[in-house]
Amino acid sequence: MLSTHLLDCKFRYLVAGKGKKFIFGYMNVDILGNAVDNYWRKGDTTPVKIWINGHREPDMNPQIFFRKFPSMLGYEKLVMKAVEGRVLDLGCSAGCHAFYLKNARGIEVEGVELSPKAAQVAKERGIVVHQMDWKGLSKSNFDQAFALMNGMGLAQSLEELDLLLNKLNLCLKKGGVLWIDSTDVTYAEAYWPMKNKEYFGLVEFQLEYKKKKQCFPWLFVDRKTAMKKARRAGFSMVDCKLEKNGHYLLQLRKIR
């Protein structure tokens, strides 16, 4: 089964998949935003049910979006200890990473989150948050940036991964550092029926929360493809930390 780090994802907006259309938009339903908001305001721990390519995955307790440093995974802790300067948290959700950086380390950190409800919760927790789609990112002056918990999945396609990496490059100073992760999910082929013959890492997610559902595409990227695209976007490889079940964390440096 997939470990928790694959499930804490920041899901995105209307996407047209090849040969089909996945209807998804925050104007209609914001499952993770609702789960975050209900936990923050009411202590409601109703889980989010998850399917990947029709295969049932472990439920997600909304408490995960408020986890503290001791409950973070090893690679999260590594990033939390390593970042410095002015920092961008892409897909911050309720702000567990930004909250730690601001309050435990005194780091100047800003978050970007599409979900209006999750962004509002993060703001109420004292985080500077820009409620926007990552495609709206523009030239900035951050020393470091990170997109964790399958950060490459925010792109939702290999073509948009190029755009995502270019946008993050624009946000960084020259020499700035990007931390971003994904998972080579070829190990899961035995129990995830193949849906996309073009690229195995393109999968279909379905979420269900309090009888409301969403279905949309998501992206997992193999390391070779990720490194190639990072170099094309103007990054050099600093380190690649390998985790369990095909998960990896890239540490990249902006060189142009």
Image (cartoon, grey):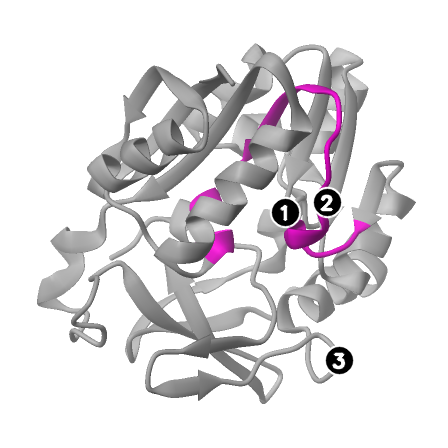
Q: Is residue 87 above or below residue 85?
A: below
Q: In this view, does 183 lie above or below 46?
A: above
Q: Which residue is outermost to the left?
A: 190
Closest to the observer: 204 or 158?
A: 158
Residue 45: x and y in percent read 64, 64
Residue contact between numbered discs 2 and 1, judged by CB atoms under 8 Å:
yes
Residue 117: x and y in percent read 80, 63
Residue to which mark 2 is pinned: 112
- Region rendered in magenta: 131-155
Residue to which mark 1 is pinned: 91
Residue 101: x and y in percent read 71, 22
Instruction: Residue 14: tell me if it is visible.
Output: yes
Residue 60: x and y in percent read 50, 61
Under tag 3, what secondary structure? Answer: loop
- The earlier-in-sequence mark between 1 and 3 is 3
The image quarter containing residue 40 is: bottom right
Residue to which mark 3 is pinned: 27
Gap in angstroms between the C-alphas marked 2 and 1? 5 Å
